[in-house]
Image: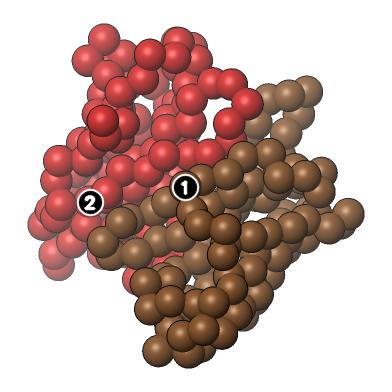
Amino acid sequence: AQKITQTQPGMFVQEKEAVTLDCTYDTSDPSYGLFWYKQPSSGEMIFLIYQGSYDQQNATEGRYSLNFQQARKSANLVISASQLGDSAMYFCAMREGGRDDKIIFGKGTRLHILP
Amino acid sequence: KAGVTQTPRYLIKTRGQQVTLSCSPISGHRSVSWYQQTPGQGLQFLFEYFSETQRNKGNFPGRFSGRQFSNSRSEMNVSTLELGDSALYLCASSLEFQGVRETQYFGPGTRLLVL
């Protein structure tokens, strides 16, 4: 079963608009962490934001915020006031509790910001 | 603080050859993980090293191996290369404090092309 689902293969958004990238996850472990990474065409994975399953508040990092709805098992990324430089591939990822340090990635959403 | 570095950035090999990729983690990070990224399979976990020991392994054949040195630098080796090994290989490092793993930070990757 797919543990991380990103249902939007691609999105086109006008510059300066807010954008929401969807992510749903599946785990039975009460302790887990959720991540969003950005991957520009250069290939490097850039860490954006992290949400722990026990965190009481939604994570925010500058223009990025994570809309964490635990009951629905969703962890959507919200980018406010989008910029041309936000055009990239975005990956949602999860690490479950326990010894494993492997992170499971979704298939990604390619975001295009239009001028 | 310098980020994760990977060498070489680009590599072209032929089938049957072997290749060694190198990763230097962020200073102070002792956990190093490797991922393979292909258009078809997305990001897949290869293995993780911590304090010179392989701590976790993904579902890859034995042709894929790795090691970690006392300075936390890591290498991965792929023997008897196949066309399907063409991919972007990403290395990530993370800090582990009192058994709690922090966010993984990725390097720029090594693009391997097998002809």
Q: Nearer the viewer, residue B19 or B11?
A: B19
User: x and y percent of residue A24 in the render?
Assistant: 24, 29
Shown in red, the chain is A
Residue at x-position 70% and y-position 65%: B75
Inter-mark Cα distance, 2 to 1: 25 Å
- Locate residue B78 relative to residue A43 in the image: left or right: right
Residue A18 vertical position relative to residue A43 in the rendered view, above or below: above
User: Looking at the figure, which quarter contains the C terminus of chain A?
Assistant: bottom left
Q: Nearer the viewer, residue A18 or A24?
A: A24
Badge 1 density bin: few <14, some 14–19, many ≥20, Cα 10 Å: few
Colour used to depict chain B in the structure image? brown
Q: Nearer the viewer, residue B65 or B42?
A: B65
| Location of mark 1 (residue) | B59
Residue at x-position 41% and y-position 39%: A104
- Tell me the chain of label 1: B
| Location of mark 2 (residue) | A109
To which quarter of the image does residue A110 belong?
Answer: bottom left
Residue at x-position 48% and y-position 89%: B14
Q: Amino acid at mark 2?
A: Thr
Q: Callout 1: helix, strand or loop?
A: loop
Viewer-side label of 2, 1: 1
Q: Nearer the viewer, residue B58 or A14?
A: B58
